């Protein structure tokens, strides 16, 4: 925000605080509303829009802001009604089509969304890059990756070339499991901006996913040369070192991260795996990742201990991780793998299962989803520790609550489909 805009916001907030008469011209109101939207202060934006509407009741641009605010407040029906009303009054703005397309996409009316987005580009072909990316970003958000690629390639074919566009193309191909194309476009993105830490991390994670630890490590090393203090880069490096079998270096890397963050267990930015974070479009890789799933330091340490045969120590590390994320399925299932090697007799397995505390017993008024999740997780755990009878019993109980539970179970344990003990045992329980 420049100085003049800052002064304008201060003036508006002073008048509001003192309950004085508020009047600004429509352009100034647009600046004020935009400021609150950029800060995700949507209630404040709506209050400013109401003052603006009182001062300029016929201003269509301010009405458009109202529709935009309604979208941000998830009131899509109201937003759509406002957009249609403006359109019916012959207000010919490409933004009407843009927001209509957004709402159509969110409602899975993809053909209508594509029609509106095509009208946007016809009405205003001179978009800047960030405006252009609005359309594919909406489509990616709703998981329409093929449709997003059509627009992104259209931009490239028209001569619009940038690191961001290539990155978005790579991301779409990755989501469509075309890793070869994803790698190609991530590398094209780096050709345009070779010092983008985020893209190097993303490329490294792609290589990790395809089993190429050496290429992954090279990518993370380059990212580290750009930002050696990045916790995400160092965690990624530790994962690549584990895959490469260089456990001592991996431990050094993990301990370095933890030593720099002694309060680590309370820091949300360590609940990370960059894929969600990196695909969100955030440029600040250091502070992103609250929604991510990249393995935490404890997870990587447990993997090393498991490989080295230190199963009890691995369980202790996973117990520590579960104090932070008690419902993390990855930790629970991996701990089950540790018990496989540690406790071969059934009595100890049942004792371990009782101690899981996977979910608390649901209260009577709680959703049945909690009951399903409890039995579903126990079924997967029992399968992982090869206690197939218990697995079938919990699986049958989960199916009684949610008939789609079997599909979810086989997604997590695909080899169970070929286990006679599971198929026969399940048939016995669901007769």
Image: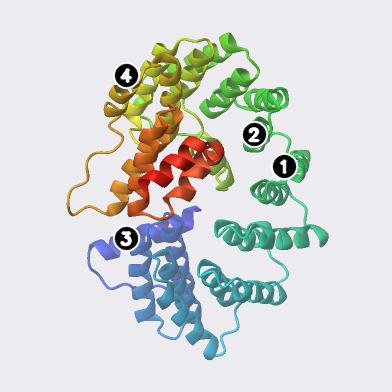
**Residue in the image at 44% along x and 60% along y:** 37
Which circle, 2 or 4, is nearer the viewer?
4
Q: Is residue 378 visible?
A: yes
Q: Is mark 4 on a helix, strand or loop?
A: helix
Q: Position of residue 243 (x, y in %)?
A: 62, 21
- Pick whichever of labels 1 and 3 is earlier in the sequence: 3
Q: Is residue 381 visible?
A: no
Which circle, 4 or 1, is nearer the viewer?
4
Q: Where is residue 116 in the image (x, y as percent from the top left)?
A: 63, 76
- Pick whichever of labels 4 and 1 is earlier in the sequence: 1
Relative placement, left or right, of 21 versus 182 is left
Q: What element carries label 1?
A: helix
- Pick whichever of labels 2 and 3 is earlier in the sequence: 3
- Pick whichever of labels 4 and 3 is earlier in the sequence: 3
Which circle, 1 or 3, is nearer the viewer?
1
Relative placement, left or right, of 166 versus 133 is right
Residue beneath disc 1: 179
Residue beneath disc 2: 209
Residue beneath disc 4: 348
Label 4 to label 3: alpha-carbon separation: 65 Å
Query: Is the residue 219 above or below the residue 187 in the image?
Result: above
Mark 1 touches mark 2? (CB < 8 Å): yes
**Residue in the image at 28% along x and 38% along y:** 359
Which circle, 4 or 3, is nearer the viewer?
4
- Pick whichever of labels 1 and 2 is earlier in the sequence: 1
């Amino acid at each position: 925000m420049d100085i003049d805009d800052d002064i304008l916001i201060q003036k508006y907030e002073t008048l509001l605080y003192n309950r004085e008469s508020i009047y600004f011209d429509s352009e100034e109101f647009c600046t004020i509303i935009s400021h609150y939207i950029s800060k995700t202060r949507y209630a404040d934006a709506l209050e400013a829009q109401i003052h603006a509407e009182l001062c300029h009741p016929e201003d269509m641009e301010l009405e458009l802001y109202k529709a935009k605010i309604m979208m941000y407040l998830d009131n899509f029906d109201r937003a759509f009604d406002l957009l249609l009303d403006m359109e019916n009054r012959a207000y010919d703005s490409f933004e009407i089509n843009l927001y209509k397309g957004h709402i159509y996409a969110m409602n899975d009316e993809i053909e209508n969304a594509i029609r509106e987005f095509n009208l946007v580009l016809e009405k205003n072909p001179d978009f800047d890059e960030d405006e252009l990316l609005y359309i594919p970003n909406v489509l990616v958000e709703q998981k329409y990756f093929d449709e997003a690629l059509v627009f992104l390639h259209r931009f490239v074919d028209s001569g619009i070339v940038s690191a961001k566009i290539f990155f978005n193309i790579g991301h779409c191909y990755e989501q469509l499991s075309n890793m070869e194309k994803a790698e190609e476009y991530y590398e094209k993105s780096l050709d345009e901006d070779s010092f983008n830490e985020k893209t190097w991390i993303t490329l490294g994670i792609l290589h990790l996913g395809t089993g190429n630890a050496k290429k992954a490590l090279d990518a993370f090393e380059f990212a580290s040369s750009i930002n050696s203090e990045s916790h995400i880069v160092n965690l990624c490096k530790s994962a690549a070192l584990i895959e490469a079998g260089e456990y001592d270096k991996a431990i050094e890397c993990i301990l370095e991260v933890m030593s720099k963050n002694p309060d680590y267990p309370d820091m949300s930015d360590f609940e990370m795996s960059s894929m969600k974070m990196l695909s969100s479009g955030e440029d600040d890789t250091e502070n992103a990742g609250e929604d991510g799933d990249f393995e935490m330091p404890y997870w990587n340490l447990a993997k090393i201990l498991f490989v080295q045969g230190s199963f009890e120590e691995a369980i202790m590390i996973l117990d520590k991780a579960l104090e932070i994320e008690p419902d993390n399925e990855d930790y629970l299932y991996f701990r089950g793998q540790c018990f496989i090697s540690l406790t071969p007799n059934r009595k100890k397995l049942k004792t371990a299962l009782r101690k899981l505390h996977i979910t608390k017993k649901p209260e009577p008024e709680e959703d049945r989803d909690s009951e399903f999740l409890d039995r579903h997780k126990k079924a997967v755990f029992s399968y992982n520790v090869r206690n197939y009878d218990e697995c079938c019993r919990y699986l049958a109980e989960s199916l009684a609550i949610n008939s789609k539970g079997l599909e979810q179970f086989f997604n997590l344990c695909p080899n169970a489909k070929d286990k006679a003990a599971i198929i026969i045992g399940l048939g016995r329980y669901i007769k």
